[in-house]
Amino acid sequence: MAKSKMTDIRNLSVDELIKAGESKRAELFALKFQAAVGSLEQTHRIKEIKKEIARIELTLAERRLSGENTNKVIKADYNAAVAEAEKAGKEVRAKQRKMIEEQYNQQFGTEVEENDMQQAMAEAMAAGQEEKAEVKAEEKKEAKKPSPRKKVTKENKDDAKK
């Protein structure tokens, strides 16, 4: 399969190679932009485009060594590539947002209101404070109990010496 890609690239003219290389660079830039924003679904595509750019550069180097003029400037349209990437990114972000909302609704129900959440938090805090009060009361009871001691008398001392 790689041989067919290389033969396709080798059949292109120098102008077409330079134009294809620039368009691939613009596409790579757009994909990296999407990856940075977090809306890139096909991360493997970056690696593929880098390989395609390398194939084009290899063919251009071969042509340069064979004596052809490859020092031509053809500019790629980066704005179009970024606009296309932004359009695809918006679709991906919308799909992600929809999926997250569905998961949230499945987990917590669709009718979760702010008042319900505040009431649940207040009940949880009250229950936590009651538990803390019970634990403190138990600690105080344990702290008040002195440890039992034996009374030391002269008789006990004499018995202990023997």
Image (spheres, rainbow, N blue to C red):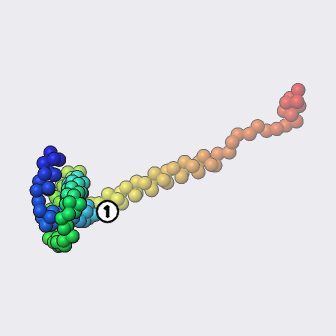
Q: Which residue is drawn at 64% across and 45% down?
A: 145
Which residue appears at 11% of the width and 59% of the height? 12
Above or below, 80 against 60 in this view is below
Q: Which amino acid does label 1 sit on?
A: Gln
Q: How many numbered circles does the render carry?
A: 1
User: Where is residue 80, by image quadrant?
Assistant: bottom left
Which part of the image, by quadrant, shows the C terminus? Answer: top right
Residue 39 vs residue 119: left or right? left
Q: Which residue is drawn at 85% across and 30% down?
A: 160
* Quarter of the figure with the N terminus: top left
The image shows residue 77 at horizontal and vertical percentages of 16, 72
Q: Can residue 114 be seen in this view?
A: no
Q: Position of residue 132 (x, y in %)?
A: 48, 53
Residue 47 in percent (x, y) is at 24, 54
Q: Which residue is drawn at 74% across and 39% down?
A: 149
Please give left or right for residue 117 compared with residue 160 in the image: left
Query: As rendered, which of 157 and 91 lies closer to the eye?
Result: 91
Percent position of residue 53, x then y: 22, 59
Q: Do we see residue 63 in this rendering?
A: yes
Q: Out of 158 and 48, give the one closest to the viewer.
A: 48
Question: In the rendered image, which quarter is residue 156 located in?
Answer: top right
Q: Residue beneath label 1, please?
A: 118
The furthest residue to the top: 162
Q: Residues within 10 Å of mark 1 (few under 14, many from 20)?
A: few
Q: Tell which residue pokes out farthest to the front in this image.
A: 67
User: Dot 1 lies on which element?
Assistant: helix
Q: Which of 10 and 77 is in front in this view?
A: 10
The answer to which quarter of the image holds residue 65 is bottom left
